Image (tube, grey):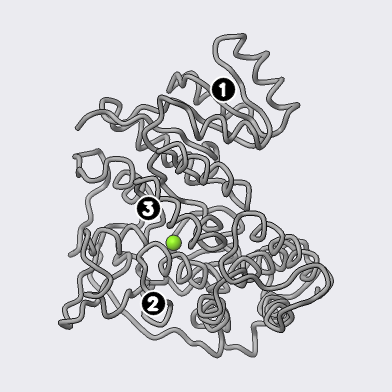
């Protein structure tokens, strides 16, 4: 394989650190030419020594100055949101991996596509908020959008270029989170500490809460809808607590293909970065006999209204998925702060969606095929509305 030059945005978060491990494991094939972190100076300094990128970025200007002092004038340190765009469009880059939590990844992702780079997507917001726009820009510029999320990577691998018309259903697997067996009556009493304990994956805080509410799976339904050009009615969810089958595709002839491995993000990250090649690595093997049992069950949609709300948001489309995403982000932050209970996360999202559904409201109205500007406006509107609702 010809070595690939990677720009890694969000290099010190959970996905970023796993990506560093993948790159360290395949030094001949993967070269990190640019990397950015929001404010983690220590993590960045260490990564610069290890990977020797050509340029870096720190979103926080004070931290950027601190890093520049520590590393001397060796390489440029870009700063602010603008810095992320600089890195995403570096002439040396082949693939830009965006793993920034929140909406900050949206602009650099679009900039990368428009500069002709393949985009590896880890930030959910990119496809949830702007899936239609991102995919149409990617088609226009002839670049590939490569999923990093384990579920979408699995579906991508099962599809391998097959057409949407051959697909009966995409089947996203979900671990079910820590409250899979908790009765709904006890949901009101769920604490932050309980919600932060995920049974099979080790991830950042926001995504761990999203896994407990199944909003994570809801966001993934909308991402899958755009990534694979399959309407949300054909995106299904099955609970699979072992997290070994990462997702499946049921084809029109009734056959189901699945992708399996032990749950470790390095697998899907590597595939996104070496695609279309598969390369040997030092990953732990998947010992099926040791795993022993794989089980599947239907999600409890009464207990987890997040799946219904995601389906609605996906069907309504336009700016609704951005509103769905933003309202959830605010609700999760207020839950972690201790200001609202677990059940109010669902209630807040539903409340804000209902207002947006009615169309024109002060501040912002629903838009059918939004450009970046309208998407960001919808996001801001929904944040304000969610703060008011909690
Ligand atoms: Mg996932």
Q: Position of residue 322 (x, y in %)?
A: 62, 65
Disc 2 and disc 1: Cα gap in Å? 42 Å
Residue sitting at x 50%, y 83%: 181
Q: Are marks 1 and 3 in contact (CB under 8 Å)?
A: no
Residue at the disc numbered 1: 45
The answer to whether residue 305 is above or below residue 33 is below
Please state the quadrant of the image where ligand 1 appears.
bottom left
Pointer 2 residue: 235
Task: Determine whether the residue tagged by mark 2 lies in a helix, strand or loop.
Answer: strand
Query: Quick check: 340 left or right of 170?
Result: right
Query: Where is the N terminus found, in terms of image quarters?
Result: top left
Upstream in sequence: badge 2 or badge 3: 3
Q: Quadrant of residue 40?
A: top right
Which mark's residue is nearer the viewer, 2 or 1? 2
Q: Which mark is residue 139?
A: 3
Q: Residue at x 35, y 69 (%)?
A: 242
- The mark nearer the N terminus, 1 or 3, is 1
Look at discs 2 and 3 and give the one toward the viewer. 3
């Amino acid at each position: 394989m010809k070595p690939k030059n990677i720009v890694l945005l969000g290099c010190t978060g959970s996905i970023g650190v796993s990506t560093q491990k993948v790159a360290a494991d395949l030094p001949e094939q993967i070269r990190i030419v640019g990397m950015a972190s929001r404010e983690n100076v220590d993590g960045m300094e260490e990564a610069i020594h290890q990977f020797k990128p050509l340029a870096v970025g720190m979103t926080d200007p004070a931290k950027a100055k601190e890093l520049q002092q520590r590393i001397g004038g060796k390489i440029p340190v870009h700063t602010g949101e603008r810095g992320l765009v600089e890195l995403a469009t570096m002439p040396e880059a082949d693939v830009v991996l965006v793993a920034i939590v929140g909406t900050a990844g949206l602009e650099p992702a679009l900039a990368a596509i428009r500069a002709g780079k393949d985009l590896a997507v880890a930030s959910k917001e990119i496809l949830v908020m702007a899936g239609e726009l991102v995919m149409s820009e990617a088609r226009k510029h002839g670049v590939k959008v490569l999923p990093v999320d384990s579920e979408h990577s699995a579906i991508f691998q099962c599809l391998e270029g097959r057409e949407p018309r051959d697909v009966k259903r995409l089947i996203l697997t979900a671990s079910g989170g820590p409250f899979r067996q908790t009765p709904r009556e006890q949901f009101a009493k769920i604490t932050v500490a309980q919600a932060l304990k995920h049974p099979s994956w080790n991830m950042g805080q926001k995504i761990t809460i999203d896994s407990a509410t199944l909003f994570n799976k809801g966001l993934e339904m909308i991402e899958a809808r755009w990534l694979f050009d399959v309407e949300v009615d054909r995106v299904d969810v099955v609970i699979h607590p072992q997290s070994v089958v990462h997702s499946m595709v049921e084809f029109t002839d009734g056959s189901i293909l699945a992708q399996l491995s032990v749950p470790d993000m390095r697998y899907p990250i590597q595939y996104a970065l070496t695609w279309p090649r598969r390369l040997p690595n030092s990953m732990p093997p998947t010992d099926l006999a040791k795993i022993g049992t794989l089980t599947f069950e239907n999600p409890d949609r009464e207990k987890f209204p997040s799946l219904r709300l995601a389906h609605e948001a996906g069907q309504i489309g336009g700016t609704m998925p951005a509103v769905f995403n933003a309202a959830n982000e605010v609700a999760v932050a207020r839950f972690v702060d201790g200001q609202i209970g677990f059940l109010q996360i669902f209630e807040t999202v539903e409340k804000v969606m209902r207002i947006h559904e009615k169309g024109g409201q002060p501040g912002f109205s629903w838009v059918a095929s939004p450009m970046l500007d309208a998407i960001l406006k919808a996001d801001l509107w929904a944040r304000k509305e969610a703060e008011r609702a909690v």
